[in-house]
Image (cartoon, rainbow, N blue to C red):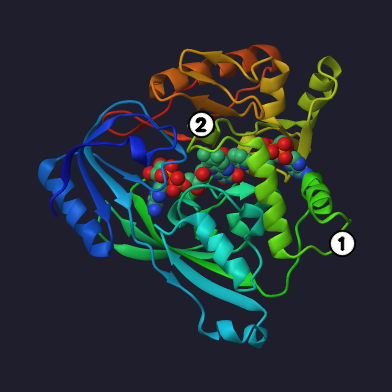
Amino acid sequence: MKPQLKVSLKPYNTLSLDVKADYFVRIHNINDLHLARNFCQMNDCPWLLIGGGSNLVLTQDFEGLVMVMAMDKVFWPSNITVPKMSDKFALSAEAGYEWDRLVEETIQKGASGLENLSLIPGQVGAAPIQNIGAYGVELAHCLTSVDVFDFKTGQTFQLTTTECKLGYRDSIFKTHPHWIVTQVNLTLNFEHEPQVGYGIIADTIASISGQSITDPSPQQIRDAVIHIRRTKLPDPKYIPNVGSFFKNPVVTSEQVESLTQIWPGLVSYPVALIPVAKTSKTHSSYYKLAAGWLIDKLGWKGFREGGVGVHEHQALVLVCSGSAKGKDVLDLALRIQADVKANFGVKLEIEPRLFDSRGEFTYNLD
Ligand code: FAD
Ligand code: NAP
C-alpha cells in the first residue's frame, strides 16, 4: 500500500472544508484494511475513515492516514426474478455503496422498506453508525446484521441488529469507533406497508398525484420524500452542509408542560419510555422537542456571519461558504447551543462527528 501524501479533503466532506491529510488511501477490500492497519501501526499514526463525508466536521489538517471507503459491491437475492416466492427480500451491500442508489434500486426491483430514507446522502456503511432515520423510519426497521473489521485487532466478525444497539441517531459504533463496517445486510419486503404517518408525506403524495391516495407505492413515497427534501434542504453540492447539526432533545412531560406555558406552540412528540434506571428519575413519559423549532423561535433561521450561517428553510441545518473553517461552523453551533440553553433550559447535542488533527473530539457547552 502506497498512500498519497498531503491530499486535500475538500472533495471528501460535504462542508467542503479544505483540510489536508498527511496520508490518503482508498479502501477497495478487506486486504486494503489490513494493509492500512499495518501502515498505521508501523508509522504510529492516527487514522480516520470517511464514507461520503456528509456527517463530519474536519477542523484541522489530519496528521495521519485518511481512508475513503470504496468497497462497493451489492449482493442481490437469487429469487429476485420470482418475487412472490417469498414476501421477504434479503440483500447485502458493501460499505462504500451509495446509500440513495441502493434505495432507488431496491424500489425498482419491487421491494419496500427503504423508501422513507430516500435521498439521505452518504454511504451504506455509515447508515448503521447513527441508525439513519427520516420521516418516521430508521435503518433499524430493516437491518439484519452488519459485517465488521476491527481496526485494533485486524479481526472480522458479524453483529446482529440487536448487538448493534441502535437508538435515536445512535449505535454501538459510536462507542467503538475502531469497528469499521464493511457490509450491511438488510431484509426488505415485497408486501408493502406504507409509512406515511408524517403528515407532510401524505399531503405531498396527494399534491403530486392530484388526488388523495390511501395505499401509496414505495415509488410514490420516494418521489414525495425527494420532493420535500429538495424543497427544504440545501444540496451540499451548492451549499455546503452536513444536514441537521443538532439532535432533537428528549425531555420529560413535566418540562414540556412548563415550557409550553412560556412558549405556546412548542413542537413536541412522545417518544418510547426511557428506562427509569438509566435516568434515576421517575417521570412517566418523555417527549422529543423539535430542535429546529427552538432555534427558529430564537430568530436564527437565515442568520449569516462571515462564511457561516443557518439555512433559511431549515434552522437545524448550518451552512458554510467555501472560505469557512470547521472551527467557524462549530463556534456558531456553540452560540446557538448557548442561546437555546439560556431560553429553553435545554441542551442541544451536536449530531455530526468532529475531528481535529489526531482524531475525534467533542465540542459542547459543558
Ligand atoms: P461520513 O460523514 O463519511 O462519516 C460519518 C461518521 O461515520 C464518521 O465518524 C466516520 O468515521 C464514520 N463512518 C463512515 N463510514 C463508516 C464505516 N463504513 N464504518 C465505520 N464508521 C464509518 N442523516 C439521517 O440520519 N437522516 C437524514 O434524513 C439525513 N439527512 C441529511 C441531509 C443532508 C443534506 C445531509 C448533508 C446529511 C444528512 N444526514 C441525515 C446525515 C448523513 O447523511 C448521514 O448520517 C449519513 O449516514 C452519513 O454517511 P457518510 O457516508 O457521509 O458518513
Ligand atoms: P419536519 O418534518 O419539519 O419535522 C420537524 C421535527 O419534528 C423533526 O425533527 C421530526 O423528528 C419531528 N416530527 C415531525 N413529525 C413527526 C411525527 N409525526 N412523529 C414524530 N416526530 C415528528 O422535519 P424536517 O427537518 O423536514 O426533516 C424531515 C425528516 O428528515 C426528519 O425525520 C428528520 O430527522 C430527517 N432529516 C434528518 C437530517 C439529519 O441530518 N439527521 C437532515 C434532514 C432531515 P425526527 O427528526 O426525529 O424525525
The answer as to whether callout 2 falls within 8 Å of ligand 1 is no
Q: Secondary structure at mark 2?
A: loop
In the rendered structure, find residue 41 and report the number of the disc placed on it.
Answer: none
Extreme left residue here? 42
Q: Residue at x 49, y 34 (%)?
A: 238
Q: Position of residue 93 (x, y in %)?
A: 45, 66
Q: Is residue 194 left or right of residue 155?
A: right
Q: Nearer the viewer, residue 10 or 358?
A: 10
Q: Quadrant of ligand 2?
A: top right
Label 1 belongs to which residue?
A: 214
Does the CB distance between marks 2 and 1 fall below 8 Å? no
Q: Is residue 88 above or below residue 283?
A: below
Mark 2 burial class by Cα count in 10 Å: few <14, some 14-19, many 20+: some
Q: Residue at x 64, y 71 (%)?
A: 111
Q: For the residue marked with disc 1, what is the amino acid?
A: Thr
Mark 1 burial class by Cα count in 10 Å: few <14, some 14-19, many 20+: few
Q: Residue at x 54, y 45 (%)?
A: 170
From the viewer's perspective, is the residue at label 2 or at label 1 nearer? 2
Label 2 belongs to which residue?
A: 239
The answer as to whether callout 1 falls within 8 Å of ligand 2 is no
Q: What's the CA distance linking mark 2 and mark 1? A: 36 Å
Q: Is residue 357 above or below residue 219?
A: above
Q: Secondary structure at mark 1?
A: loop
**Quarter occupied by residue 297:** top right
Q: Earlier in the sequence, mark 2 or mark 1?
A: 1
Q: For residue 365, say whether it is visible.
A: no
**Quarter occupied by residue 169:** top right
Q: Nearer the viewer, residue 140 or 98?
A: 98
Q: Nearer the viewer, residue 99 or 259?
A: 99
Q: For the residue marked with disc 2, what is the amino acid?
A: Ile
Q: Position of residue 91 (x, y in %)?
A: 51, 72
